[in-house]
Image (cartoon, helix red, strand yellow):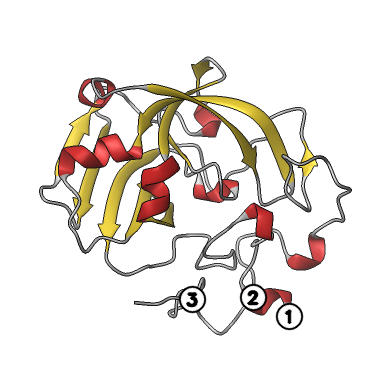
Amino acid sequence: MTTSNQPSQQSTAVQPEFGLKRPDQVKIAPPAGERVPPGQFVAKTFPVLTYGDTPEVDLATWRIRVWGLVSREIELDWPQFCALPWVEVNADFHCVTQWSSLDQTWEGVWVADLLEQAGISPEARHLMAHCFGDYTTNVPLDLALSEGLLAHKQNGAEIGKDHGWPLRLIIPSRYGWKSAKWVNGIELMAEDAPGFWEQRGYNNNGDPWQEERFWPELTR
């Protein structure tokens, strides 16, 4: 198993792709309080940042699938997903493009409660979130189990279409690209693998408190 924060299959051609923020574009941010990671500016709004088009999702045909290293593959429709226990979580949100939005309230289902329906195989160590538009992002399974939320509401209202409606993965302790929009699948894996942005220059771990924005090769 790869123990480095960077998956071994990354290309040596370390060129940022698809307009992602580059190291030379990072601005110097003044300290903004103990809740704000270094290099972040507190935003008064919740900006929309997406690669690609906003998908048209129909709840009548929507499904979320769980597969990979599970006891049984499952696929839930929207009423079945809504029948799982719902919780409300208050968490700050930190985007890699240097804005932070504090005191966001999210409502949805714990990732752990969804995975309980499928049964987690003992050898599972990593999670890949799959989304409409073929976006993916990877997180350690233990992190997803401890804080991952599949959110349908933000600040008391349904998440906007551009923000991931009907379902967005929320991983509060990581930069926002790990909080994948329009989630429709969860895959459990033994070995780590990079997701969409992790293949294209963003750090595999994405901890805002360590300013893990980019591949180490891009910051040398």
Give the residue number, with chain letter if any, for mark 1: 220
Q: Amino acid at mark 2?
A: Pro
Q: Residue furthest bottom?
A: 12
Q: Residue at x 21, y 39 (%)?
A: 116
Numbered disc 1: secondary structure: loop
Give the residue number, with chain letter if any, for mark 2: 216
In which quarter of the view is residue 218 placed?
bottom right
Give the residue number, with chain letter if any, for mark 3: 4
Query: What is the C-alpha distance between the residues marked 3 and 1?
Result: 17 Å
Q: Which percent across, then down, holds residue 155?
A: 57, 19
Q: Which percent across, then down, holds residue 1?
A: 34, 77
Label 2: how many residues lie within 10 Å, few (<14), some (14-19) or many (20+)?
some
Label 3: how many residues lie within 10 Å, few (<14), some (14-19) or many (20+)?
few
**Mark 3 vs mark 1: which is more N-terminal?**
3
In which quarter of the view is residue 107 placed?
top left
Q: Residue at x 35, y 29 (%)?
A: 109
Numbered disc 2: secondary structure: helix
Do tag 2 and tag 1 residues touch (Cβ < 8 Å)?
Answer: yes
Q: Residue at x 65, y 46 (%)?
A: 95
